Image: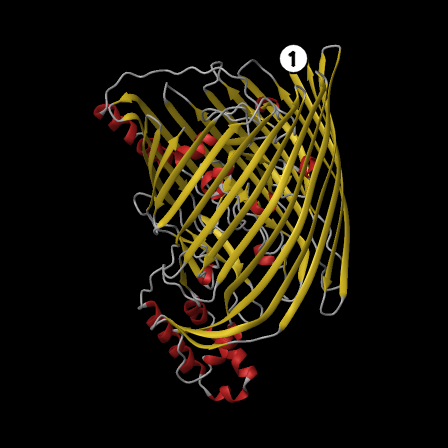
Amino acid sequence: MYLKQVNKILLTSMISICTANVVFASDIIHEVTSYEESAYAPLKGFIAKKSATGSKMDIDIKEIPQSVSIITNDMMKTRNTQTIQNTTAYTSSISQVYGENGDSTTNYGYIRGIGQIYKSSFLDGLKLLHTGFLVPNINPYSLERVEVLKGPASVLYGSAAPGGLLNLQSKRAHHKNEGELGITYSSFNNKTIFADINQRVNEKVSIRVNGTYKKGDSELKESSNMSYSFNPSLLYTIDDDTTLDIYTSFTKDQVKGLGITFSGGKAISNVHNSVSLNAAGIKSLINYMDPRFLAVPSTYWIGKINQSAQEVNSLNLPADLLIGASDKELLEKENKSITSVFNKTFNDDLSFRSSLRFSKMKGKSRYSNIDFTSMIGSIANLNPDLSKLSFELVKNESTMKSFAMDNSLLSKWNTKNVENSSMIGLDLQYYDFNQRYQKEDKYGFDLKSKKVTNYVNSTGLVKKENRKMKQVGLYAQNSAKIANKYILSTALRYDKLKETITNELTNNSKKQDDSNVSGRVGFVYLYNDEISPYITYSTSFQANAGENKQGEKFIPSIGKQIEIGLKYKSKNDKTFITLAAFKLDENDIVSDSRDPNYKVQEKDISIKGIELDITSNPIDNMNLTFSFSKMKGKSLNTPNPKFDGHNLSDIPEFTSSLWSDYTFKNTKLGHLKFGAGVKYIGKADYIRPDYLDVPLKTQKVYKIDDYAMIDVLIASEYNSWNINLNINNILDKKTKLANGSTQSRETQGRTFLLSAAYKF
């Protein structure tokens, strides 16, 4: 089956290119540009050969004993990516439980099946600190590249998920005068203006201003969105060996009308079907709550419940119906930050790098939750009506101040036949987070009339909390190149974490201290200039705040991985391939217990997988990327024994993608580009609590079907203008995702984005 899917991908992705060859015949001009690549500088094309993420050193990717995938700025421009989820959609071993467009407010994806990406995302090597719903959103237009480091990376970056991390690299000022201004118009009446202008002031100073402003509607009817991102930066070349980069960022994201996805994404309510499925248990609960209900025959009442559920199904409610209080729901986040990066080269063998970031976030969140208690009470009668849902509107206001720092010293030294690159460093992460919860407003929603009913305002404060976290890490690593043939990479890190949570209404505080030692040892064999097999063993940790029912503090979850792989770089630098196989384990995971008021720390997981990433320019003016991954994960020591050995949630059994584009030079319409891409996402299990399986709310397995999507591109570069038309999911493929007890999400249908940019 997999080969069949891959064949479909290969065939479909070449259609536009083959067709264009017939229609447009022109001479092909091969442009040759020579420059020295740096992991921190702008890069032309799709193929990156250097990375600073896998080692914190600017080195060849072939010398890193771990899988690294890089999405360059040209890749992002070609596909006109609008979110980080879009940006990583063609990269192996990245899965999106809600689809790549299902939730633009937060990146809930996974790398190698473990740990949500937003918890392990970094910007310019510094962690994007977050808590609660205050998760920074980064616009791809502000980025030079996105690097995906797969597998444990705590030895370099501290607390992070063992599946891997994202390192986003900002566009920075440079010594070349250039700029662009542009507009876009896209589906759901979204309009965007954007600008990126770089100016050299003098021999020492350059400035750059990058920004976007977007406004429009969301997938759901009655839902709208607005966002802006303004990112000035400055480069100060102090002398030939010393530079200072300063970036500032001002961003805001706002969604009005969230619906039951909390994001403005499409969904279909499953509550009525869940009530029908669990009718016998709900009847027993109502009997216990109100003994008078014992007089109602179970067979009669369950029959009425099933009948009402069928009536709701017969409504055929559209997925873009906003089920909720559209005029009350809001998600709003503002982020202001300033980052400095100082580089000092003392000589050819010694250099120093210091990165600092101060950030301040604030936000409001008002989202609707199903009020199961009220709903169960409302159907405790002779004629239950499941078309009437009960909701509570949860209101939260939060602020966060954060600071991150990373200082490192790099030394290069040689012994007989051995070239060493050694680094020592110290980093610090800190945040101060405050949140206020107000009493929930209550209301109903009638699925037949599609209107809100019986809205009741509540007032008063129910929770006021302060949370402070500090992490200090000391790390050291060495890369020893032996006889220009072998590379032995070793790294060690010690972390100390402290977290304090204070209930400011009761003045009670809980403190937690954790420490951990992480390590990595890897070996790379430089077989020749093209091929380099490698093997590595690495560990990671994730801190777990809280305690179990017995009052025992949770300890960090520990990840361990062994990975073997092979990297290939062609002699002409036009093809780069990474093939990797891995076994990844994480122990002592905190998970839900049968008591909904407490969590337990006893779950372990194990994942095995194989992945392939290819980036190539097979012929002049053509780009091609291909990826596939096959993973299998198991749960062990779960609170519910029936899930022991079961497949892990949210991991497609197989994924594959292919993107290709071709540019016809010097036609009458300019440089014409045609492209197409196919993504295949395999079947997966979606394991979540069934909130209506009373009273235990046990987890259940919901199935997600496999699906494929096709994206296409038509673009022209004419004089100083770039015009792009991107159509995603052109066949309008719709598949249910996150098919749980309360809702079924749906993949985003066919969308388009038309952009025009003027370069100067």
Q: Front-most of 722 and 605?
A: 722
Left or right? Give the position of 386 relative to 514.
Answer: left
Quadrant of the rendering where the N terminus is positioned: top left
Give how far across and how far down residue 302 sits, in percent: 42, 77
Give how far across and how far down residue 203 sits, in percent: 59, 21
Work out which residue is located at the far front of the displayed protein and give it: 202
Residue type at mark 1: give it: Asn
Q: Which residue is mark 1?
A: 484
Left or right? Give the position of 322 relative to 669.
Answer: right
Which residue is rendered at x = 70% and y = 60% of the image?
Answer: 466
Which residue is rendered at x = 31% and y = 47% of the image?
Answer: 732
Which residue is rendered at x = 40% and y = 46% of the image?
Answer: 706
Left or right? Give the position of 182 relative to 480.
Answer: left
Give how far across and how far down residue 650 sits, in percent: 51, 49
Q: Is residue 1 visible?
A: no
Residue 29 picture quarter: top left
Q: Front-most of 188 and 174?
A: 174
Q: Front-most of 644 and 336?
A: 336
Mark 1: secondary structure? loop
Residue 539 picture quarter: top right
Left or right? Give the position of 121 relative to 327.
Answer: right
Relative to residue 556, is residue 233 depicted above or below? Answer: above
